Image (cartoon, helix red, strand yellow):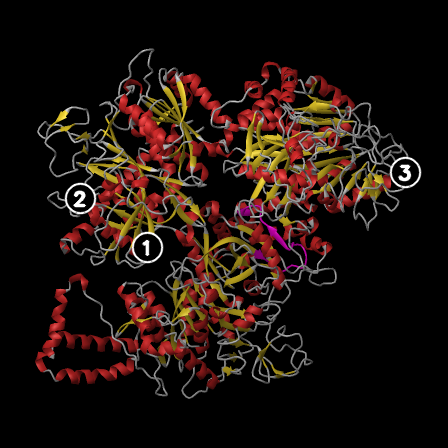
């Protein structure tokens, strides 16, 4: 047997790298009762599973003296009834038992004598040595061993014990402390495995007075820390520790702060003589042998602790040893180390907690660039499943732990706890702030914790917990104050004394604690031990203040948030020394815990902002503890705090939805901003909770300054500036300037001097101010308070009967000249008018108060909002502006020193001393509403009514804003904004512009009558339209209220408006009911019997006059609207998908019409006509033209306004909304409305949404697209089909009669009218006269084809149908003219060969241009062209270029028909070869035209061979124009032009031009990605199929890979596409579609040996170009067969023989074939959603450096591989990023960035990235790898890596297959070949890194991420 042993030993040599691992099992271990601990039999599979995982290198294990043992969690025990304790016993290595075993093994070995292999005895000796070493010291960390020895000698303990961290050890120590009296075991039934400790009454809390920071000097420690000289303190501590552990055991406690394996965790070792510390550290940290193993020789923090109570020989110990008279907790941050002496309590003794995790860690964080914070970490999950992680830092006793384990009271929300006390914050790889909890347990304050306040904590501590200084119940459980409502009748208190409720002292100490494992928490977050931490979205600070601080405040900025953190103040808690209840400042809740100067700590926070970029969390401040006048808490707290957290989450992101107001101290929720549904709390209480008391805060400023002074000049200037800014914002007093904006102050002073008011009032916008002004107007007679029960907080105003509507005749646009104002506006000379106005305003406010009203049009904080300030002497204006705009102090604060629009208003009625005022002061004989657009400013005089006086409304929001919009590139429109939601949940936002009294407000608040649809209102009157970041049109409502016409509004016409105005509203010129309510015509069916009318006179139904004025108004807050859209205040606005215009015409205009294209829609908007309304002067019922419903509101020449709309189209690209025109008011022959209107209008809106989606039915008419009779849903509506036909009828004669009136209207604008409008008018008239017979109604397409026809002058135009018949006809034509030659139908059925002009045979790379505004836009890899000169050159080239030829119109689709990811194009060409190419490569013809008829969007592709034919001139077989070849892509408008070449991708522009170059432009705009790659699937014989994209440069086998027939039996590859992939993210996964429908690839080199699938594909139905033909009529090219035929006709048409010295086929010879003929086409190739991509394969063609295949270690590492794809030609290395060098239509740097950013959209579904290099050569220049079908062996490994099973070895460049990983069965393969193919050579790679770095510098725009990745690889090589 000894020889047998030797044979096993020697056998190793035969195995090389392939040696199996060896394991030893023992199923038969028994417990103390002799029972088997392991169930065996089938359960042994669990052990086998671990063995397999170890073979794969993934199974968890720990080294022991006898070998690798599974970690406790490594064996899968799911479904197995076995405890963790039993598992630990099964895996326990008993060192003593093993040492007893050694002699028996020696005895056995001795029987073999000298024949025993020495290796075995050597192994036995080594085992014995390891066991002996393990029994004494379980580590080889020499620094640790030296330190332990040093402390042992200093402290002279009886013995040393190295803590293992096992449950057995914990149990033994607890049992020992029970015996010693330190612990009392609690009732096992009530608290299993729980203990109670009672400390010495003098050792009960942190001892801050004895806590020292011994930095090198006192300034480093700062004024908030106790400093001591480090040398002196170390000497003192050494004296104290001398012999301090005599008579005790010295425990060595290795621990890890943070999850083991986390890059952010830190190691420490605490030496202590307290077993109480050991068992608490076991709970609070990862501790013991596992830590030692992980730590190895790494650095650790030395932490030394002693209770300071040595025992003399024979001396009895006490239950709680300590030395309260000599307590020291000392930190040496420079070493660093921690020494603690004299206390055994909490943070004084558990040195991993506050000492390490905060004080020392804060110093480390400052040095290393992270933050150590006294913060909880929690995860919130919304009902929709969105998760937010939040850090919150509060001083002790402010509810930190309760918040961390909160149980929300709001439905659908959940909270999960990551940590309750400490957070370590780092910037993660994704650039976001990530947090780990460095602790593993909770050390919480017990008093106050209950099932009400913290149910989760109570559940957590039900078992396995330690309680300190709580009371003990008679039945052996614990109790503390606040745990139950009633105290038990009798207890043993925390001192061990008998206690009753009336004894007058506390049962538990106020700082009593529980120590409990975090893993037991029922709400522990699943990510709480994620080694990368959790991403933080918000940081919350908080304190405990009775008043001053609101419930919650959001910081303006990061620096403001740091300021907020720096001024935290709170009551002093029992957790620290001091007077309980005393208030002290506790910055960041870190005052006791910051290990260095706090001023430097503030700096660190401020500077940390730079690391976060766009991913900066928001900062908030909360105060749960605000009290009422009686001292009671206003806020219920505990679970209700979830309501505040919900608001915090709503405030996150770029589009916060949480409602807030700006206050001097920050953003505070509006009263209704916090969800208080189901909570017994009223608005008054919420106001108190959210109140910002300026006087209180001003008093606070002094305390803050005083606090800052202690830091001297180290305090950051940023904080001082924030304090000064706060002081300025708070210094607001009503009659003094409330702003530092000098422009505003100067203007107010100027107007005060001009108008001479009695008083000045700076409006604050508060509810109190509003109430005071309303009450004053009630007293003055301006207002009548309505019935509080019927209309709470509502008022009625009656105006002067002469001041009841807009006065357009008195409204002026004072532009620099009359032409600028235009014919539709009243113009006056600005200088003369300003002089006139100044005279009118002179003294006009005498006797009155001048109100300064700062306001914001649009949501505060929106980039699209604008500021204004109105000065007025009308309190009626002030209260209306409070409702209609964001107004007051909040606006001033937000505005700062920014620009504002000055708006001056006066009623024009000064009061002499003693003169009584009237109820409605005005000056109707001198009314002026004057706009100065050049300044700009608005002056209004004489009217107090509506838009004449509320200058933020029509004056600013339309007239002035329209001028600003024209200058700045946006639109200010008289439009409602509404959101429609379909039954499927899809949302559509629509703008609608109607003249007054055409149902605008009713439509905005529509209640749909069709099931499942809902409408939400964004705004009812005005829209500001901008192009958003996403390229779509976005709209904001600049107003905050509704100023609507009351008459006609009812529960029938507008129920939502009626509900909105039930409270907090102002009514003007309506009637008053006897019971104090309001009424107007149309409000009810029957009028009341008696009213007081709008003039104040008695009214009855038969009196013959109106009760309410026709223009009577209501002013009401938009926020009250029951159908207000949740996005109505989104600062980015809402995305608009449709624009609706409308008028009020009894005939002529159909119910709804869709414009053909944008320009046609602008034309429709320009001809709106409607009845004149009571809202303006004029004759009721008179019809006038009101373009865009803006006639009274456009602030400049309307012709220029039209042009602005025309030009605006260019900003929208493919994302332009559709435009519609509606007419609800068509009447029948009896004059009755045919359409019911109101809620039924939702049926029309539904059709509009369907048209937006491209599914609504429509027919083309001369005026636009009209619904088919069945297109509008009429279910449940009593309307006949005859009526519907009439509603949708286009009366051609009536329309022709309308033409002269439109011409007349246009004529008034002279030559300023845009030619586009007159052109549209002419086209309309032409269409009305006769309709075209072309196969499409897409007017945009028709117009373009007509334009190209006029330009190119072809003989004929042919609209391609895409049918087989058409294809055959075109091929026959080309056969006749010599372009094609038909091949032998027996050899190649339905196949042809083409021979190009010898000089038109490849892509014209040098003549391909990208036309963009700047060279930078196209980057270094493209030829740039200036757009305008290039377009001019193209027009010259194309002029007449198709003479004598047919112009083919080829509609085509890129991608599967019906796919939302497909894109449409139309190519015009004079080449039938291009037509058949497009027909093969795309979905083409009538089926695409049908799609185009439903939508205007398509890419225009213009191509010509550039060879016009003169009359009678004979054509050539291959027409082209070699002198003028050019291909141009226009990035701005997405047009493609190609001239002069008839070859391949130069002529069928769908391929490289559209699919790749232009595709990259579209993709960047629309957030998808274009890649030049193959798409294929890999599938094993059994198992999952995975889709892969492979990006390889030309000539690297891309197509062969996609259609491979694998060499490995049973495996298959299926092709989705061979050249291009369009990649998009759906549901968090990456999907790919193939935009092509065919293959156009190089024929040369293809053969049946390597390319069976390709050869099978081109057997028939193929067009070959520039190949040779055989005498038998088949094709041939080099590589097709081993031996060439004896005779051929070459690609130029000449005779060819093998010895003629030239190629038979051109090297770029091609085949063109439809993909449907491919035998390995994947069944999902036409899936409209695409196929899910699991991996990318990048490839290079390199002789060396790159291994055969390797896997990137991360996404960024993969992107680096893609960016550095390369090929070698001779010795010249050419880089080709992502194989897109020649195909990227944007700057290649931007394209690479798109790849980088793609990762952020993918999350956990990120595909793996691989790199292949088939072309590695040996020293003789021979390829090492056979390639072709053998590449399937690599694909198999890729598949395995996707599955997570393939074997690898880690290298600096990523993961390379281990030699045994590749399936090389049947392949000639040696270890040397494997090594050569898979080698990663350091020298080669260092040279490559340099080359890549140089290339990146050449590109000039590569991101820091990639350059850092490159440096990282270099660093890895440097250390390997």
Front residue (pair 1871, 1053): 1053
The answer to whether residue 1210 is seen in the rendering is yes
Q: Is residue 195 above or below residue 416?
A: below
In magenta segment, residue 205 = no
Which residue is labeled 1 in the image?
1842
The answer to whether residue 1197 is seen in the rendering is no
CA separation in Å, label 2 and label 1: 30 Å
Q: Which residues are magenta?
A: 541-559
Q: Quick check: marks 1 and 3 in contact, CB under 8 Å?
A: no
Secondary structure at badge 1 equals helix
Q: Quadrant of residue 1066?
A: top right
Between circles 2 and 1, the one closer to the viewer is 2
Between circles 3 and 2, the one closer to the viewer is 2
CA separation in Å, label 3 and label 2: 102 Å
Q: Position of residue 1641 (x, y in %)?
A: 27, 35
Nearer-N-terminus badge (3/2): 3
Which residue is labeled 3 in the image?
1100
Front residue (pair 1402, 803): 1402
Q: Position of residue 761 (x, y in %)?
A: 75, 38
In magenta segment, residue 542 = yes
Give the quadrant of the C terminus.
bottom left
Q: Position of residue 141 (x, y in %)?
A: 30, 67
Q: Would residue 1459 be found to the left or right of residue 1104 on screen?
A: left
Front residue (pair 238, 1165): 1165
Q: Would residue 618 be found to the left or right of residue 1546 on screen?
A: right
Nearer-N-terminus badge (2/1): 2
Which residue is labeled 2 in the image?
1649
């Amino acid at each position: 047997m000894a020889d047998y042993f030797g044979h096993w030993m020697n056998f190793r040599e035969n195995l090389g790298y392939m040696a199996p691992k060896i394991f030893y099992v023992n199923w038969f271990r028994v417990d103390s009762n002799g029972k088997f601990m392991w169930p065996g039999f089938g359960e042994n599979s669990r052990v086998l599973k671990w063995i397999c995982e170890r073979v794969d290198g993934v199974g968890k294990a720990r080294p022991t003296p006898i070998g690798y043992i599974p970690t406790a969690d490594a064996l899968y025990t799911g479904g197995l009834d076995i405890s963790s304790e039993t598992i630990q016993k099964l895996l326990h290595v008993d060192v003593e038992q093993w040492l007893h075993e050694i002699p028996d093994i020696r005895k056995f070995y001795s029987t073999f004598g000298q024949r025993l292999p020495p290796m075995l005895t050597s192994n036995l000796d080594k085992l014995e040595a390891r066991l002996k070493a393990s029994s004494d010291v379980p580590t080889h960390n020499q620094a640790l061993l030296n330190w332990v020895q040093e402390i042992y000698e200093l402290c002279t303990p009886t013995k040393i014990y190295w803590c293992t961290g096992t449950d057995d050890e914990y149990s033994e120590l607890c049992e020992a402390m029970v015996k010693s009296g330190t612990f009392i075991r609690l009732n096992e039934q009530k608290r299993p495995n729980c203990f109670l400790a009672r400390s010495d009454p003098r050792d009960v809390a942190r001892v801050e007075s004895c806590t020292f920071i011994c930095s090198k000097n006192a300034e480093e420690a700062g004024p908030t820390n106790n400093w001591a000289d480090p040398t002196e303190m170390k000497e003192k501590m050494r004296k104290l520790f001398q012999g301090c552990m005599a008579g005790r055991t010295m425990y060595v406690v290795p621990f890890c702060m943070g999850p083991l394996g986390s890059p952010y965790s830190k190691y420490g070792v605490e030496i202590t003589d307290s077993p109480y510390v050991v068992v608490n550290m076991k709970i609070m940290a990862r501790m013991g042998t596992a830590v030692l193993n992980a730590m190895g020789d790494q650095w650790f923090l030395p932490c030394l602790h002693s209770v300071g109570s040595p025992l003399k020989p024979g001396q009895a110990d006490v239950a709680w040893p300590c030395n309260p008279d000599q307590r020291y907790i000392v930190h040496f941050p420079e070493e660093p180390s921690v020494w603690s002496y004299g206390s055994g309590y909490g943070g004084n003794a558990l040195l991993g907690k506050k000492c390490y995790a905060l004080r020392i860690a804060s110093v480390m964080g400052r040095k290393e660039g992270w933050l150590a914070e006294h913060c909880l970490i929690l995860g919130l999950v919304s009902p929709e499943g969105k998760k937010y992680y939040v850090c919150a830092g509060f001083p002790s006793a402010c509810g930190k732990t309760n918040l961390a384990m909160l149980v929300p009271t709001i439905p659908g929300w959940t909270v999960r706890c990551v940590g309750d006390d400490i957070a370590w914050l780092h910037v993660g790889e994704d650039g976001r702030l990530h947090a780990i909890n460095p602790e593993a347990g909770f050390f919480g304050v017990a008093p106050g914790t209950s099932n009400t306040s913290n149910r989760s904590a109570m559940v957590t501590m039900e078992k396995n917990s330690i309680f300190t200084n709580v009371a003990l119940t008679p039945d052996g459980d614990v109790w503390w104050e606040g745990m139950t409502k009633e105290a038990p009748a009798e207890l043993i208190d925390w001192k061990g004394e008998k206690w009753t409720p009336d004894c007058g002292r506390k049962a538990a100490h106020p700082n009593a604690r529980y120590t409990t494992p975090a893993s037991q928490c029922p709400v522990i977050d699943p990510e709480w031990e994620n080694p990368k931490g959790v991403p933080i979205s918000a940081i919350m600070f908080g304190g405990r203040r009775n008043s001053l601080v609101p419930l919650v405040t959001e910081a303006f900025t990061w620096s403001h948030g740091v300021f907020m953190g720096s001024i935290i103040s709170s009551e002093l808690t029992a957790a620290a020394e001091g007077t309980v209840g005393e208030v002290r400042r506790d910055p960041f809740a870190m005052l006791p815990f910051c290990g260095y100067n706090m001023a430097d700590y503030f700096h660190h926070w401020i500077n940390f902002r730079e690391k976060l970029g766009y991913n900066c969390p928001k900062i908030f401040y909360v105060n749960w503890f605000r009290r009422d006048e009686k001292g009671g808490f206003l806020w219920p707290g505990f679970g209700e705090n979830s309501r505040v957290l919900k608001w915090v989450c709503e405030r996150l992101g770029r589009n916060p939805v949480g409602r807030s107001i700006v206050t001097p101290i920050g953003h505070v929720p509006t009263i209704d901003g916090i969800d208080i549904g189901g909570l017994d709390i009223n608005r008054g209480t919420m106001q108190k909770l959210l109140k910002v008391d300026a006087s209180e805060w001003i008093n606070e400023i002094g305390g803050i300054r005083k606090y800052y002074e202690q830091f001297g000049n180290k305090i950051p200037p940023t904080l001082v500036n924030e304090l000064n800014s706060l002081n300025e914002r708070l210094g607001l007093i009503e009659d003094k300037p409330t702003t530092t904006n000098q422009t505003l102050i100067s203007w107010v002073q100027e107007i005060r001097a001009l108008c001479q008011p009695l008083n000045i009032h700076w409006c604050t916008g508060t509810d109190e101010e509003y109430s005071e002004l309303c009450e004053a107007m009630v007293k003055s007679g301006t207002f009548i308070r309505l019935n509080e029960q019927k209309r709470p907080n509502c008022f009625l105003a009656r105006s002067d009967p002469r001041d009841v509507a807009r006065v357009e005749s008195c409204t002026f646009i004072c532009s620099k000249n009359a032409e600028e104002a235009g014919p539709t506006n009243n113009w006056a000379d600005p200088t003369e008018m300003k002089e006139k106005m100044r005279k009118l305003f002179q003294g006009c406010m005498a006797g009155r108060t001048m109100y300064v009203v700062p306001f914001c049009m649009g949501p505060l904080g929106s980039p699209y909002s604008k500021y204004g300030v109105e000065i007025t002497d009308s309190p009626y204006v002030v209260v209306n502006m409070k409702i209609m705009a964001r107004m007051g102090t909040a606006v001033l604060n937000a505005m700062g020193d920014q620009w504002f629009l000055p708006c001056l208003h006066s009623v024009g009625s000064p009061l002499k001393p003693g003169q009584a005022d009237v109820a409605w002061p005005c000056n109707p004989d001198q009314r002026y509403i004057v706009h100065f657009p050049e300044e700009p400013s608005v002056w209004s005089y004489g009217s107090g009514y509506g838009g004449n006086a509320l200058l933020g409304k029509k004056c600013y929001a339309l007239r002035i804003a329209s001028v600003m919009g024209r200058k700045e590139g946006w639109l200010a429109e008289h439009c409602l904004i509404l959101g429609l939601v379909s039954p499927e949940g899809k949302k559509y936002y629509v703008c609608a512009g109607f003249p007054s009294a055409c149902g605008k407000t009713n439509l905005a608040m529509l209640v749909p009558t069709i099931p499942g649809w809902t409408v939400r209102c964004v705004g009812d009157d005005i829209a500001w339209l901008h192009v958003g970041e996403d390229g779509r049109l976005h709209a904001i409502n600049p107003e905050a209220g509704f100023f609507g016409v009351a008459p006609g509004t009812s529960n029938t016409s507008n129920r939502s408006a009626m509900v909105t105005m039930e409270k907090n509203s102002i009514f003007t010129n309506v009637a008053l009911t006897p019971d104090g309510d309001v009424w107007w015509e149309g409000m009810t069916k029957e009028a009341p019997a008696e009213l007081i009318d709008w003039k104040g006179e008695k009214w009855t139904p038969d009196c013959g006059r109106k009760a309410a004025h026709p223009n009577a108004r209501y002013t009401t807050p938009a926020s009250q609207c029951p159908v207000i859209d949740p996005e109505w205040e989104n600062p980015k606005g809402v995305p608009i998908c449709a624009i609706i215009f409308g008028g009020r015409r009894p005939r002529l205009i159909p119910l709804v019409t869709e414009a053909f294209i944008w320009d046609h829609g602008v034309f429709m908007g320009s001809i709106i006509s409607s009845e004149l309304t009571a809202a303006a002067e004029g004759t009721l019922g008179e019809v006038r033209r009101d373009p865009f419903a803006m006639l009274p509101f456009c602030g400049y020449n309307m012709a220029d306004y039209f042009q602005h709309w025309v030009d605006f189209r260019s900003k929208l690209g493919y994302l332009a909304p559709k435009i519609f025109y509606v007419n609800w008011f068509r009447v029948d022959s009896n004059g009755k409305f045919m359409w019911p209107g109101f809620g039924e209008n939702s049926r029309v809106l539904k059709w509009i949404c369907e048209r937006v989606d491209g599914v609504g039915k429509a027919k083309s008419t001369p005026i636009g697209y009209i619904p088919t009779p069945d297109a509008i849903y009429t279910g449940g509506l009593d309307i006949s089909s005859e009526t519907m036909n009439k509603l949708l009828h286009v009366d051609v004669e009536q329309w022709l009669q309308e033409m002269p009136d439109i011409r007349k209207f246009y004529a008034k604008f002279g030559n300023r009218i845009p030619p586009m409008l007159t052109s549209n008018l002419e086209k309309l008239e032409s269409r009305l006269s006769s309709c075209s017979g072309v196969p499409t109604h897409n007017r945009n397409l028709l117009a373009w084809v007509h334009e190209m026809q006029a330009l190119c002058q072809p003989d004929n135009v042919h609209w391609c149908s895409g049918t087989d018949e058409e294809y055959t006809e075109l091929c026959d034509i080309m056969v006749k003219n010599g372009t094609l030659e038909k091949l032998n139908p027996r050899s190649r059925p339905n196949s042809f060969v083409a021979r190009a002009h010898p000089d038109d045979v490849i892509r014209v790379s040098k003549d391909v241009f990208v036309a963009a505004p700047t060279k930078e836009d196209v980057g270094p890899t493209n030829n740039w062209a200036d757009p305008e000169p290039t377009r001019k050159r193209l027009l010259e080239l194309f002029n007449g270029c198709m003479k004598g030829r047919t112009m083919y119109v080829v509609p085509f689709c890129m991608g599967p028909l019906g796919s939302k990811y497909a894109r449409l194009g139309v190519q015009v060409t004079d080449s039938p070869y291009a037509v058949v190419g497009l027909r093969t490569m795309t979905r083409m013809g009538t089926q695409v035209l049908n799609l185009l008829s439903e939508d205007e969007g398509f890419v225009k592709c213009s191509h010509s061979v550039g060879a016009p034919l003169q009359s009678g001139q004979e054509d050539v077989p291959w027409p082209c124009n070699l002198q003028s070849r050019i291909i141009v892509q226009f990035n701005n408008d997405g047009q493609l032009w190609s001239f002069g070449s008839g070859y391949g991708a130069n002529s069928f522009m769908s391929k490289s031009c559209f699919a790749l170059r232009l595709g990259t432009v579209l993709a960047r705009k629309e957030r998808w990605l274009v890649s030049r790659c193959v798409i294929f699937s890999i599938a094993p014989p059994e198992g999952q199929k995975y889709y892969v994209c492979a990006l390889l440069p030309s000539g690297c086998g891309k197509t062969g890979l996609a259609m491979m027939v694998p060499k490995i039996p049973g495996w298959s590859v299926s092709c989705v596409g061979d050249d291009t992939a369009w990649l998009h993210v759906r549901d968090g996964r990456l999907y790919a579609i193939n935009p092509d429908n065919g293959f156009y690839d190089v024929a040369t080199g293809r053969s049946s040996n390597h390319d069976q699938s390709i050869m099978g594909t081109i057997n028939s139905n193929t067009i070959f170009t520039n190949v040779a033909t055989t005498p038998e009529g088949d094709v041939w090219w080099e590589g097709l067969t081993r031996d060439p035929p004896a005779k051929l006709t070459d690609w130029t048409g000449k005779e060819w023989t093998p010895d003629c010295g030239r190629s038979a086929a051109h090297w770029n010879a091609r085949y063109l074939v439809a993909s449907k003929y491919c035998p390995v086409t994947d069944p999902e190739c036409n899936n409209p959603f695409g196929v899910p991509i699991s991996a990318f394969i990048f490839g290079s063609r390199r002789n060396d450096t790159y291994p055969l295949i390797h896997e990137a270690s991360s996404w960024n590492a993969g992107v680096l591989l893609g960016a550095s794809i390369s090929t070698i030609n001779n010795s010249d290395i050419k880089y080709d990023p992502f194989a897109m060098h020649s195909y990227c239509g944007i700057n290649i740097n931007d394209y690479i960035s798109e790849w980088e950013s793609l990762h952020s959209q993918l999350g956990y579904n990120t595909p793996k990235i691989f790199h292949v290099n088939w072309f590695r050569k040996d020293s003789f220049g021979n390829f090492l790898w056979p390639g072709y079908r053998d590449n399937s062996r690599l694909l198999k490994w890729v598949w395995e890596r996707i599955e997570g099973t393939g074997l690898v070895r880690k290298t600096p460049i990523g993961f390379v297959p281990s030699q045994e990983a590749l399936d090389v069965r049947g392949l000639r393969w040696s270890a040397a070949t494997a090594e050569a193919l898979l080698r990663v050579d350091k020298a080669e790679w260092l040279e490559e890194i340099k080359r890549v770095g140089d290339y990146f510098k050449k590109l000039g725009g590569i991101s820091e991420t990639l350059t850092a990745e490159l440096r990282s690889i270099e660093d890895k090589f440097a250390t390997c």
